[in-house]
Amino acid sequence: MAAVTTLAQAVHEDIGAALAATDAELARRYPGDPGTRQPVHTVYVPADAFTARTPRTWGDQALTALDTHAPDAGALAGVLGLPETLAVQVHDRVRAKLRREPVEDLRIDFEDGYGPRPDTEEDAAAIAAARTVTAAVADGSAPPYIGIRMKCLEAAVRDRGIRTLDLFLTGLLDGGGLPAGLVVTLPKVSFPAQVTAMVRLCEEFEKAAGLPAGRIGFEIQIETTPSILGPDGTATVPRLIEAAAGRATALHYGTFDYSAACGVGAAHQSMDHPAADHAKAVMQVAAAGTGVRLSDGSTNVLPVGAADQVHAAWRLHYGLVRRSLARAYYQGWDLHPAQLPTRYAATYAFYREGLDAAAARLAAYTAKAGGAVMDEPATARALSGYLLRGLDCGAVDSSEVADRTGLTLAELDALAGRPAQVPGPAPAPGTLRTAGSPPNRGE
């Protein structure tokens, strides 16, 4: 029996025409996951302390801390409260990670971590940073993502920030070109006009240097109260993303500047303070679907000193990282090499302990087999995204995922809404990951 409808085709066409502009606006504003590997952390190093050996030095110091304070899986389990079986898997992988790729994302800091210096000194540091990054990228010792945090665009330091950015980018070009993993961080953003100005800087540099339009993206640091709530009482973050005109790659929460701006006392400034949770909830909703990534902040309680002090700081850091991961903040800042063991321990435990359940649910969904949980396409997207993030950071192997789900990496990418991947190096943040899959997959 033929299907019978009432509405004329003209109605379909009229509705389509009426919503065409809305369709285009949705596609522009909410393009979805960019399909790139997101680093699990960002390491900030003052510009005057940065050398070609910095990533390896951090890795060596992290290994020393691990060997001293948690030399085996049993010790790690005792410090962090991990089940013994999970601790064995995590300890081995953390050690391997610290040897292979201790730093995933490194920011050479010309802002708070560097402070005001004579112009000649900062000029020299910016030029030296560019040369060091160029050499490190050439010999393969650079982290997958690396760049600078410039001074902000507030009046007092605006010219200095612009000049440092110009010197650094020019130095990279003189050395052979901008690296694929280049990242630029714009701190202390309060108003959309500052983001618009940053876009103008990027555009003008691209034109002058003969670069493709849109080549330079940047992260926006959320560390002032006007960046969350504007003077008119409306949320500012969506306006910042819009002002970036497609160049914003991430929003990074600044724990201590934001807490201080809210009047939070120094003893209570933390990633889990209610003021921090409110700011990050606004950031999360504003960034959802836009392709702009999120990063949590840091803890300044460092794992140094006697064993009991190190263990206490590790437990705090581990708990905060796990808390961030559960709240879909998959990246954060690390301020000290001895934080790397718990950064990776928390991240690897998060993905390994959920591996079997997530894979089983995804396998049941794709097989339409049903089960104890009725999953929808959106949940399948979240499940596949979870497994892919675990693969990206090295928490799980592609063989483990394939054995449990029966899915290829291309099928996982499709379920997660990511572009299909091909072998090769990791591409720049904010660009489609068509140049290659993350180096940790399957290792």
Image (cartoon, rainbow, N blue to C red):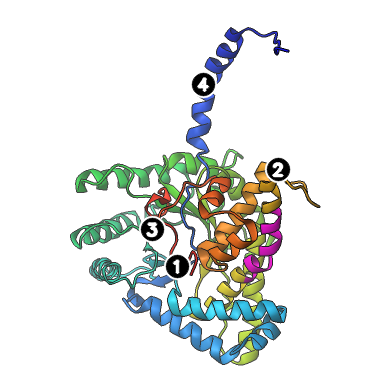
Amino acid at dot 4:
Ala
- Evaluate if marks 1 and 3 touch, with contact meaning CB atoms under 8 Å apart: no
The residue depicted at 62 percent of the width and 74 percent of the height is 317
The residue depicted at 65 percent of the width and 75 percent of the height is 316
As drawn, the label of residue 376 is 2
Q: Is tag 1's residue or tag 3's residue first in the polypeptide sequence? A: 1
Q: Is tag 2's residue or tag 3's residue first in the polypeptide sequence? A: 3
Q: Which residue is label 4 attached to?
A: 20
Q: Is tag 1's residue or tag 2's residue first in the polypeptide sequence? A: 1
**Viewer-closest of 34 and 5:** 5
As drawn, the label of residue 104 is 1
The residue depicted at 42 percent of the width and 45 percent of the height is 195
Which of labels 3 and 4 is toward the front? Answer: 4
**Viewer-closest of 3 and 261:** 3
Main SS of the magenta part reads: helix
Q: Which residue is label 3 attached to?
A: 183
- Highlighted range, magenta: 349-361
**Extreme residue in the front direction:** 1
